[in-house]
Amino acid sequence: MDLAYRLFARPYLFSMDAERAHVTALKMAGRVARSPELCQLAAALYAPAPSPRLRMQAFGLTFDNPVGLAAGLDKDGEAIDLWAALGFGFVELGTVTPGHGQPGNEPPRLTRVVEDRAIVNRMGFNNRGAPHLAGRLAARRTRIPCGANLGKAKVTPLDEAPDDYEATLRAVWPHADYIVINVSSPNTPGLRDLQAVAALEPLVARVVGTNRALAAEHGRNVPVLLKIAPDLADSDVDAVAELAVASGLDGIVATNTTLRHDLLSRSAGIEGGVSGVPLAPRALELTRRLYRRLEGRLPIVGVGGIRSAEDAWRRIRAGATLVQVYTGLIYEGPGLIASIVEGLDQRLRESRYDGLADVVGVDA
Ligand SMILES: Cc1cc2nc3c(=O)[nH]c(=O)nc-3n(C[C@H](O)[C@H](O)[C@H](O)COP(=O)(O)O)c2cc1C
């Protein structure tokens, strides 16, 4: 348990409106990230004990531990080196859109439902653009895998969406370790329609094709994953899984936020995607379904409502090779990372498995 966060930082941040708290915390994180000495201090206070049992391989990359920062918290890559210092095994930046980015939706667009350990957001991809993120990625000191999550601008018509994904891909490609095609945020009108196979096929073909051309030109392979919504019908999940395999994608991130506000115990007061504890059962179920369907052909990154080592352990047993957290970090603080990483290691020691890779999908 992260006592300092619970006693001091969280009450202070939670006394502010959620977006102001986010901006304040991220600004501070950015300042710490720029100082190698402060990052060292953060690592001394928070980083988990390393364990070779937790090393994972996925889509051609090696991860010292399987716990990553989910997309959307640090969209512009302002604090990459701090996330690494705190003990994350990998970080996903973005979602970014082309050019100079966009302001996102009008506030209010972010709120907490504390009783449910949930967040509701309708941010709408506020970001400074893919070229800016590329610069932040280029300037990072850490070697942990850093992914770039790509989206389309609000003003871009759906039938021109592939142009946006290609532009953002080209901008971040030289400095990203992996790419995520985000077609699952509920806050860009029509975006989730791109998950329908008829729309998804040409979009994925464009990104994978451009990626292959860049790989051939530069002699370096960058894996491409697809991030999906928890609100897809099971039959659509199966279709997307098959499409992902057939079109040469390297993995699936499951899941984004849900539009199921009935999972909350009270009205959030704003529209938008629900994250945190209420999302966990569906995200877990989807991981298990995907794992069964994919039969090991593609790895799954499990995300949605993970806030303890037990949650992460269950998600990995259901089929996730890697996991990510966002909302859990807001409620539990930076100590959550070590608590999950060390908790996974303890469960492994008490199990008959030699390494975490052997646990993936055992409950599926
Ligand atoms: C405020 C907020 C902003 C988010 N922005 C993005 C985003 O830009 N791109 C994306 O793919 N997911 C975004 N997400 C979704 C998270 O990456 C994650 O999939 C989701 O919150 C479920 O995980 P959690 O329950 O641990 O938060 C956002 C989530 C929150 C709470």
Image (cartoon, rainbow, N blue to C red):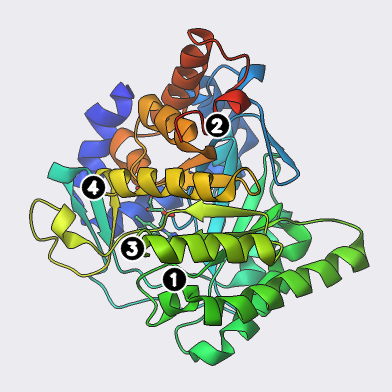
Front residue of 243 and 93: 243
Question: Could you tell me which residue is drawn at 48 percent across and 18 percent down?
Answer: 342
Which comes before the other along the chain, label 3 or label 2? 3
Q: Is residue 184 visible?
A: yes
Q: Residues within 10 Å of mark 1 (few under 14, many from 20)?
A: many
Q: Amino acid at mark 4?
A: Pro
User: Which residue position holds label 3?
Assistant: 231
Q: What percent of the width, then of the height, locates residue 203?
A: 62, 78
Label 3 CB sits under 8 Å from any ligand 1 atom: no
Q: Which residue is mark 1?
A: 125
Badge 4 crowding class, 10 Å Cα cut-off, few under 14, some 14 to 19, many 20 or more, is many
| Place of residue 299 in the rendered image (x, y in percent of width and height, measured from the top left) | 61, 45
At 36% from the left and 45% from the top, the residue drawn is 285
Ligand 1 occupies quarter: bottom left
Question: What whole-number distance in Å separates the C-alpha atoms at marks 3 and 2?
Answer: 24 Å
- How far across and how far down the image is residue 348, in percent? 52, 15
Which image quarter: residue 165? bottom right
Contact, mark 2 vs mark 1 (Cβ under 8 Å): no
**Rendered image quadrant of residue 230:** bottom left
Numbered mark located on residue 278 in the image: 4
Residue at x-position 54% and y-position 82%: 198
Helix, strand or loop at disc 4? helix
Under tag 1, what secondary structure? loop
